[in-house]
Amino acid sequence: MSSSDIFIGETIGTAILILLGGGVCAAVTLKASKARNAGWLAIAFGWGFAVMTAVYISAPLSGAHLNPAVTVALAIKDGDWSNVPVYFAGEFLGAMIGAALVWVAYYGQFQAHLTDEEIVGDRATQAAGAKAVEAREKGAGPVLGVFSTGPEIRNAVQNLATEIVGTFVLIIAVLTQGLNDEGNGLGVLGGLITALVVVSIGLSLGGPTGYAINPARDLGPRIVHALLPLPNKGGSDWTYAWVPVVGPLIGGALAAGVHNIAFA
C-alpha cells in the first residue's frame, strides 16, 4: 500500500465511520429527529454497522485501521512504524470531516434543539449562567455527546481504566480474528467480526464513558464541536478530552503485547 492509498483510504473510511456513528447519536439525541429517544441499543448497533460499512469501503486502500489504537497495535505487532504518521493523519482528518457532515445532515435539528428552552433554558436562565436540565453535565454542552464521549461518573482513574479495558477487547479481537491475509489491516470476514465486537463492547462496557475506544473518533469530532457555529452549544469538555485519547492507546498497546506473547 502506498502512502497516498493509506491516507485516502483512512480519510474516507474514518469519515464514513464518524458520519454514521455520530449520525446515530444525533438521531437519538436531537429534537425533531424521528429516532429521538431510540435508546442505547440503537446507538450500539448504529456504531457497529458504521464500523462494518467503513471497513468494507476503506480496506482495499488502507487495510481499514480507522483507529490510532489499531495502528499502534499493528506497529507493535510487526515492529514497523514507518506508516504510522500517515495513518494518524488520515484517521484524524477523516474523523473531523465525518463530524462536520453530521452537522450538515442534521443542521435543522441542531438549530431546533439548541434554541429550545427545555434544552438550554430561557433567556433569564442563560443570563444567570445556569443550565437547563438537559445541559448540566460538567464542562459539556447539550449536544457534545453527538460529537464525542463523556463519563457518567467523573473519576479519571475509573474512566481511564474503562477505556483501556474496552479498547483491549477490541484490539485483541482484531489481532486474533480480524486481520487480512497480509496481517496489515482488516479482512472481509474480519470487518464483520470487528463490527459485532464493537456492538458487544457498547452494550457491555459502554455505559460508564460512552466507549470511545478510538482516539480519532473522540478528539477529531470534539475539535469540530469547538469550531462549529452552533447556538448555545456549551463547552467541549477539554478537561476530559485526554482520557479517550490516552486510554485507547494504552489499551491497544497492551493488547498488542499480549498478542505477541500469547498468540505469536
Image (tube, rainbow, N blue to C red):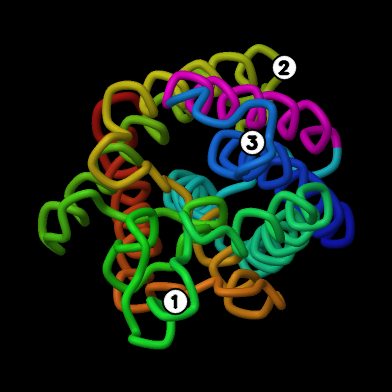
Q: Are marks 2 and 1 in contact (CB under 8 Å)?
A: no
**Residue under the image location 35 percent in, 41 percent down:** 167
Point out the tag, 2 or 1, that comes first from the N-terminus: 2
Magenta stretch, residue numbers: 40-60
Q: Is residue 10 magenta?
A: no
Mark 1 element type: loop
**Residue under the image location 71 percent in, 48 percent down:** 14
Q: In the image shown, does 82 or 125 lie closer to the viewer?
A: 125
Residue 27's disc is: 3
Q: In the image shown, does 187 or 133 lie closer to the viewer?
A: 133
Q: Amino acid at mark 1?
A: Gly
Which residue is the site of mark 1?
Answer: 235
Res 136 → quadrant: bottom left
Task: Find the distance from the CA under tag 3 to the CA under tag 1.
Answer: 21 Å
Q: In the image shown, does 215 or 204 lie closer to the viewer?
A: 204
Q: Relative to 214, does residue 263 appear above or below in the rendering? A: above
Point out the tag, 2 or 3, that comes first from the N-terminus: 3
Q: Amino acid at mark 2?
A: Val
Mark 3 element type: helix
Q: Are marks 3 and 1 in contact (CB under 8 Å)?
A: no
Q: Is residue 93 left or right of residue 144?
A: right
Q: Nearer the viewer, mark 2 or mark 1?
A: 1
Percent position of residue 108, x then y = 79, 53
Residue 188's disc is: 2
Q: Nearer the viewer, mark 2 or mark 3?
A: 3
Mark 2 element type: helix
